[in-house]
Image (cartoon, grey):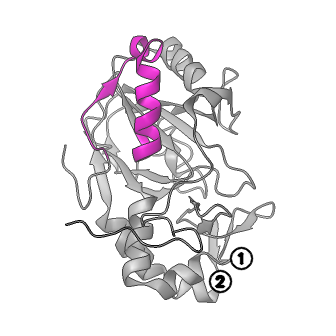
Amino acid sequence: MPSSGTALPATDEEFTLGALGGDGLERAAAVLCERGLVRLSRLGGRSDVLDTAALLMSARWQHRDADPDGLTVIRDTGRHEGRAGFAGLGRGDLALHTECAQLPRPPRLMLLACARAAEEGGESLVVDGRSVLAELVGSHPTALEALSAPRAAYFGGSDGHFAPVLEHLPDGRWRLRLRQDELARFSPEAEAHLPALRRAVERHTTRLRLACGQGLVLDNHRVLHGRTRFTGERLLLRALGQPHPSLGLHAGFPAPWPAPRPAGTAPPLDRG
């Protein structure tokens, strides 16, 4: 799998529906907590995708474009190309984003399953927001300050939502929200730092070519996703939802630096 920048998946480990229904669920939850992404394999069709979603999600999110069972068919419909907010239903490049950024509470998990691969192109793009945060805090702290302001961005149309791009949560964890199309507008302070953000996103982009029966589960509050343009009849199935309590996911993702010591405690002794 070709990749650029920091590869997000720590391993080529893949989980089948059978494994998730057994002892593999605990391991998959640990990978999701650590990396923000879990890879799936041997998905036999729509019923397998629904069963996998049922194991990982407490309730499926009914997206605007979803079928009655909660799954959305991601393909070139031939009628959505060029329409704001519908780039996923065309065959062009899909800019990296989090799903449903315009909502006050976007769904936490997204499952993508490949039912038919493209003839050419159609690679899935993923970016770990934790790596982006680490780069910004290390090299562009003023950018992070602007992008984490409460009204750094406005996502959506008339019923959209003001939100930070990188939200600092009360417990020291972080949450990511981003789109890069006509339905995203930024404050002057945040817009001045978009080049630094986009460079960090590009450096940490990983490309994954999904074959038929393979899939991904993404933490939508941490991982950006997108797609390269393609030819052929590429078809994916998507499920959105909130994580099942058994996964043990805390809100947001941990900061990419050590937690501060409690007040009044001494640093550890150097025994080296």
Cβ–Cβ below 8 Å for labels 2 and 1? yes
Drawn side of residue 157 relative to residue 181, left or right: right
42 or 95, which is in the foreground?
A: 42
Element type at mark 1: loop
Q: Is residue 28 magenta?
A: yes
Residue 149, horizontal then vertical, whole percent: 66, 78
Residue 230 position in % (x across, y down): 32, 44
- Disc with the residue nearer the chain's start (2 vs 1): 1
Which quadrant would the C terminus be assigned to in this image?
bottom left
- Seen at 39% across and 17% down, the residue is 43
Q: Would you say 263 lies left or right of 156 here?
A: left
Q: Is residue 116 above or below residue 16?
A: below
Q: Nearer the viewer, residue 3 or 20?
A: 20
The residue singled out by tag 1 in the image is 151
Q: What's the amino acid at mark 1?
A: Arg
From the image, which quarter does the N terminus lie in?
A: top left
Going by the numbered disc 2, the residue's amino acid type is: Ser
Task: Name the residue tied to disc 2.
Answer: 187
| Residue drawn 37% across the image and 73% down it | 135
Q: Nearer the viewer, mark 2 or mark 1?
A: 1
Q: Please report the bounds of the magenta region as a residue range.
A: 9-37
Q: Nearer the viewer, residue 33 or 202?
A: 33
Q: Is residue 260 above or below residue 57?
A: below
Query: Which residue is found at the position 41% from the left and 73% from the top?
Result: 198
